[in-house]
Amino acid sequence: MIEGIDPLAAVLACPLVAAALLALLPGNRVAAFVNIVASLATFGAALAILLGDRPEPGRYLFIDDLNIVFIVLNTFVGLTTSVFSAGYITHELETGRLSPLRLRFYHGMYQLMMFGMNLALISSSIGLMWVAVELATLSTVVMVGLYLTPEALEAAWKYFILGSVGIAFALFGTILVYLAAQPVVGEGYDAMVITKLMERAAEFDPALLNVAFVFLMLGYGTKVGLAPMHAWLPDAHAEGPTPISAVLSGLLLNVALYAVLRFKMLMAANPAAISPGPLMVSLGLLSLIFAAFMLYRRRDIKRLFAYSSIEHMGIIVFAFGMGGPIANFAGLLHMAMHSLTKSGIFYMVGLISQIKGSQRIADIRGLTQSHPLLGWGLLIGVAAIAGLPPFGIFMSEFLITTSTFARAPLLALLFVFGLIVAFGALMLRVIEMSFGEPSLSVAKADASYFPFLIHLGLVFAAGIYLPGPVVAWFQHVAQILG
Amino acid sequence: MQSTLALDIAHLLAGGLVLVSFMMLYQDRLFALLNMFALHALVLAASVAWQAYIQGAEHLYVTAAIALLFKAIIIPVALHRMIVRLGVHRDIETAIGVGQTMVAGMGLVALSMALMFNVTSEADPLVREDLAFSLSVVLLGLLVMVTRRNAVSQIVGFMSLENGLVLAATGAKGMPLVVEISVAFSVLVAFIVIGAFLFRIRERFDSVDVGALDEFRGDRR
């Protein structure tokens, strides 16, 4: 760690400076390189926060055991995506789908989005967090519409409208939380600071908190992609550039989830307020089962994995809704594993759709023959995301199932039913794509396989052996989540 | 202590906002809808300014000024010009009839009154009324959005929804940052929308493919 540089500030400053720089830099190669360097520096800063001493909670920024998990994950996937994006974007430029000017825009927006997400994660007040989530949303909206095709514009429009309504509800909830806190904590900025809210939460007016939580759950839940507010998610994933699909699934959904968790903790700290669990469990189960069935009707490979993201966000929200040390631990683990696996899968999907020139599942056949590494990689990645052992997701799903069986067997049955339905759909589609006669173009991919290999390796390693410190860390976070 | 008259005026203005929201529900022409939105923003500005006066909170005057300048003047004028350029100043196709929409709107207002008066029984009367009215405005804005298929009227619905949020934030005494920032963001939102439209228009003129032009005409493919 370099003396004199505050890693907390660096996590924000790196992407912000890079965004300004990238907006000015012409030349795709340089821009892609700067993008990677900035992401690397941000990841370095996140590691420095993780390994260094915890700073005292500041007025605007703070770090605790919960948000550091999200920050490290966020900056890591941001880094690998920037590596993947460099190769992907070069191909898009060569095929003429994107112009150099729009690329410049893309790179600037990418770092602005990273800034928004990091700010949402480390801001110490619920007001600032809301602003940051909105910033991240707006920057992804323009990237979803980047190709300017009618489909892309429609997807961006849908995302913008639904996301804005969600974010408006979240603001209303935030105002209500402030109103509940104001008589206890006092007027002004203090009544929005998370640490101060947590200290005095027991004295807040429970009725006001209840209403606030419903608004926050619906608002941020829209951004998490929970059914029935999920309609924006498949379109946004399918029509934008693939690196954006990867960060949407791997990161932005998590950031919204983080906001939900913060308010869940606040609710749990007030004994008179309703328990947030049942609401989260039912939304989670609904998303899981709904998305599992929707997986069967998908014809577009990116939409397929977008629905799989809805399914997994449902699983995670279900786990946190059940609560307790084991389910919370499993929820955190699942969130980390899903981010890594799903963004890894999107890297492969990006390469595949560039090779085939199509996103239709029917156009993609015999991948294991024409592209052994990519084909088997996709098969393994889908096996991991569908929850087969020995991958990390199997472990977290197993933990959620067992801990639910002990407490609510009926819910566990529904949960397992959803998992099995989704498993069937995913395996059916991936086997179609992996085997048989190779279809369309069998050209070599010109981007590197490196990012998705790293992600698959990590997920595999986590499934075989989780290092002791990581387990202790996650267990501690699970404890504070209550 | 606030006098009854001061409170009554605050209620009148906030209630006026709900009334204008209702008037937006049955406008079937885009220009009329835009005028209603400008009126909506005007009432909001008056309401925020009045609350700034009775709360003695100077920073709220800034919010009122932004509401007046951007929402009541600049954005309606910009949207007006856009509608003319896009050539979509025909009737709005409402998804459901005016009658049903109005009934639904009344139901939403009743719902938000019932909800907010129940939960805020201990709060300041100003806060209580403000919250109930602002939730009504938010829900009515949502109703405008779901009953319209036209992109411009959806933007207008969304901005009226955001006006409701500003009203709520104003009522929450001493709420920091958020008033200014939320207004700044609504401006940003409007810019993005306008930007998107300009892009669409430019794409239309850049392209030589007539089929592509047909695709872009109207808001739904």
Image (cartoon, coloured by chain):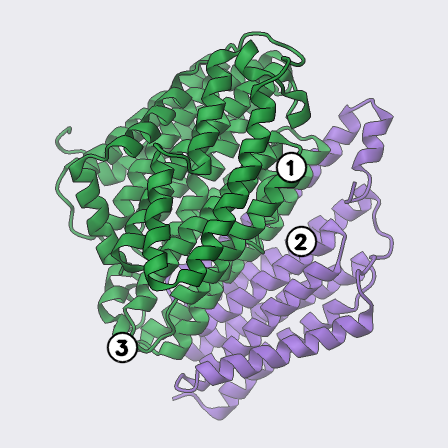
Chain colours: A green, B purple
Q: Is mark 1 on a helix, strand or loop?
A: loop
| Kind of residue at badge 3 | Glu
Placement of the C terminus of chain B among the 4 image quadrants: top right
| Kind of residue at badge 1 | Arg
Q: What element carries label 3?
A: helix
Q: Distance between the residues labelled 1 and 2?
A: 31 Å
Residue under label 2:
B155
Location of residue A111 by image quarter: top left
Q: Residue A203 carries which label?
A: 3
Chain of the residue where label 2 is placed in the rendered structure: B
Q: Could you tell me residue A184's position as x and y percent?
A: 27, 76
- Give the foreground label among 3 and 2: 3
- Give the foreground label among 1 and 2: 1
Q: How far apart are marks 3 and 1 (CA)?
A: 49 Å
Q: Is residue A114 above or below residue B188?
A: above
Using the image as rendered, state which of residue A418 and residue A470 is in the foreground.
A418
Residue under label 1:
A298
Marks 3,1: beta carbons within 8 A: no
Using the image as rendered, state which of residue A231 and residue A294 is in the foreground.
A294
Chain of the residue where label 1 is placed in the rendered structure: A
**Is residue A6 in view from this perspective?**
no
| Kind of residue at badge 2 | Ile
Q: Indicate left or right for B129 with A149 as reference.
A: left
**Is residue A44 in view from this perspective?**
yes
Q: Could you tell me residue A246's position as x and y percent?
A: 48, 32
* Disc 1 crowd, CA 10 A, few/some/many (<14, 14-19, 20+): some
Q: Could you tell me residue B190's position as x and y percent?
A: 61, 49
Marks 1,2: beta carbons within 8 A: no
Chain of the residue where label 3 is placed in the rendered structure: A
Q: How far apart are marks 3 and 2 (CA)?
A: 40 Å
